[in-house]
Image (cartoon, grey):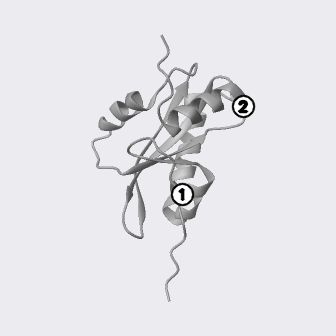
Amino acid sequence: MTLPAETDFDDWIIATHAEAGDFTMLFVLLGIGESTVEPRRAAWLHVLGNETRWPEMKRLFIGAGVAWDGVVFYRAGREGLVPDDTARARLAALTAKLHEDRSLVRDGYFFNADGLTLQLEEVRRH
């Protein structure tokens, strides 16, 4: 039995699966400060079907063993599912780029700890 969609994340994963079919997603857990976003841990997950819901993802994140305030998701590629070695390489490239340029969070799907959509805005310093 598929649970109803109750969060923005749930809506996103249902829509993404409808568009792409089964797919591999990369995700990065983030610490969010007043004016900072810090990558904490990253992994990939093969999404088979559209039954994954936010509470299940949160349980997965607990296993990372780090404090986190948000998470950003990316599709690993347009081709849908990718092999583990491809996902690993793409995740390594993504996390290296995120450490250099946090604005890349805007290219993904960014959610808070409640599964609600967040937006990254640039802080202008005077």
- Looking at the image, can residue 81 be seen? no
Q: On the image, which quarter does residue 64 sit in?
A: top left
Where is residue 15 drawn, in percent x and y? Answer: 64, 31
Q: Earlier in the sequence, mark 1 or mark 2?
A: 2
Q: Can you say whether 71 is above or below 102 in the image?
A: above
Q: Residues within 10 Å of mark 1 (few under 14, many from 20)?
A: few
Answer above or below: position of 115 versus 4. below
Q: Cβ–Cβ below 8 Å for labels 1 and 2?
A: no
Residue 25 image position (x, y, % from top left)? 56, 35
Q: Which residue is mark 2?
A: 79
Answer left or right for 37 relative to 13: left
Report the residue at 47% width, 44% height from top: 116
Judged left or right of residue 107, residue 92 is left
* Disc 1: which residue: 119
Q: Residue at x 59, y 49 (%)?
A: 108
Q: Nearer the viewer, mark 1 or mark 2?
A: 1
Q: Mark 1 falls on what kind of element?
A: loop
Q: Secondary structure beneath disc 2?
A: loop
Query: Can the viewer see residue 102?
Result: yes
Q: Nearer the viewer, residue 25 or 53?
A: 53
- The residues tagged by marks 1 and 2 sit, at their Cα atoms, a distance apart of 26 Å
| Depth order, front residue of 81/55 | 55
The three-letter amino acid code for the residue at tag 2 is: Glu
The amino acid at mark 1 is Gln
Q: Position of residue 123 (x, y in %)?
A: 50, 75
The vertical placement of 122 against 23, above or below, is below
